[in-house]
Amino acid sequence: MDYVYGPGRNHLFVPGPVNIPDQVLRAMNRNNEDYRSPAVPALTKTLLEDVKKIFKTTSGTPFLIPTTGTGAWESALTNTLSPGDRTVSFLIGQFSLLWIDQQQRLNFNVDVVESEWGQGANLDVLASKIAEDTAHTIKAICIVHNETATGVTNNLATVRKILDHYQHPALFLVDGVSSICALDFRMDEWGIDVALTGSQKALSLPTGLGIVCASPKALEATKTAKSVRVFFDWNDYLKFYKLGTYWPYTPSIQLLYGLRAALDLIFEEGLDNIIARHTRLGKATRLAVAAWGLKNCTQKEEWYSDTVTAVVIPSNIDSTEIVRQAWKRYNLSLGLGLNKVAGKVFRIGHLGNLNELQLLGCLAGVEMVLKDVGYPVKLGSGVAAASAYLQNSTPLIPSRI
């Protein structure tokens, strides 16, 4: 029985965890089985090959770790770096802040480049630091591709251009937790050394899989990295890869079958079509926000996220009340403002296995909540703006043509 029952389906529009497709739920509804039997290694082998496709890599080595994005962060850092190594990391929101905190607690020498929340990473500062670092003391660039707290997307291609321009050997580590499988992401083309994501975001699975992909350069770095690592040690995985059994410890059988179903759905729709769908949903949400007379937390169009929109509300309204009212009255789950933007913004997640009509239902709910808390919104204004755009831009469903 639900802990707090509400009629109908919960409208889940936080920026992760996201809606789980019925096909994935059914795939996971199974008993445990012996992971040392031939079935699970055979399944794992196909998963490792297919996961590379969502990172857009042919040379990367993937790891399916039973953890969250936080564990995937730690895996990326400890397998490639040594205590005291200098990293450059960008503080632009709550999740980049938490990754910086992890780097500091792991005893790396973190060179923090801070920007106002709502702005992207300051890549001009990065270019200056890389240009000055002729001794190559910077060992890694750590950047969050999509900052979920503020709805800001960073330009990874530019980071690679900067490193290449100055022929700098620093590793390029990317948090793609709320971007991979939803936004344009090209691990090989952009020369990313470690990319990571979490199962509960655009993959539309339950929380519990940290998916990490390492370039040959990153694997080479493990040979000299002196950070202590046990649970997250890639070398343990690689040893079992060679044996053909794949697992150094017990995996979540149900999540593996769920991942198989999720990848099948992704490939059926087509990754490029999925990215285009997220582009439409992001644009529609921003049009609705503008029609309501509200502002996007993200300060420039070049940084707009197509997976989450952080909406700035007037100072006389506490955004926490918007989130609370949405859940209590309309069974609608929205994202809270975090840390510096707590009480100032609410977040609409529009990522994962989600379609246009689902989004319009969310936008209608937001309008009613805004009216409830005293904001003078014209009911139907945001929905109309989003509907007009989506009606003109939504293609036929490929499998139904």
Image (spheres, rainbow, N blue to C red):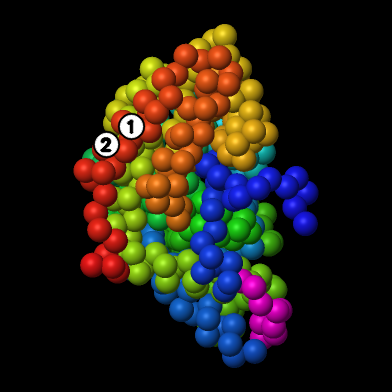
- Looking at the image, which is closer to me, 394 or 124? 394
Local packing at callout 1 (Cα closer than 10 Å; few below 14, some 14-19, many 20+) is some
Looking at the rendering, which quadrant does residue 324 occupy? top right
Q: Main secondary structure of the magenta part?
A: loop
Q: Residue at x 64, y 89 (%)?
A: 37
Q: State the separation of the CA atoms marked 1 and 2.
A: 6 Å
Q: Is residue 260 magenta?
A: no
Residue 36 pos. (x, y %): 66, 86
- Looking at the image, which is closer to me, 24 or 61? 24
- Looking at the image, which is closer to me, 316 or 87? 316
Please determine whether, in this image, residue 206 is positioned above or below residue 377: below
Q: Residue at x 69, y 61 (%)?
A: 230
Q: Which residue is mark 1?
A: 384
Residue 178 pos. (x, y %): 47, 46
Q: Is residue 35 magenta?
A: yes
| The disc label shown at residue 270, or none | none
- Looking at the image, which is closer to me, 150 or 93? 150
Please determine whether, in this image, residue 297 is positioned above or below residue 24: above
Q: Which residue is mark 2?
A: 388
Query: Mark 2 falls on what kind of element?
Result: helix
Please determine whether, in this image, residue 249 is positioned above or below residue 311: below
* Amino acid type of the residue that numbered disc 2 sits on in the rendered structure: Ala
Q: Which residues are magenta?
A: 28-36
Query: Mark 1 falls on what kind of element?
Result: helix
* Amino acid type of the residue that numbered disc 1 sits on in the rendered structure: Ala
Local packing at callout 2 (Cα closer than 10 Å; few below 14, some 14-19, many 20+) is few
Residue 201 pos. (x, y %): 51, 51
Looking at the rendering, which quadrant does residue 105 occupy? top right
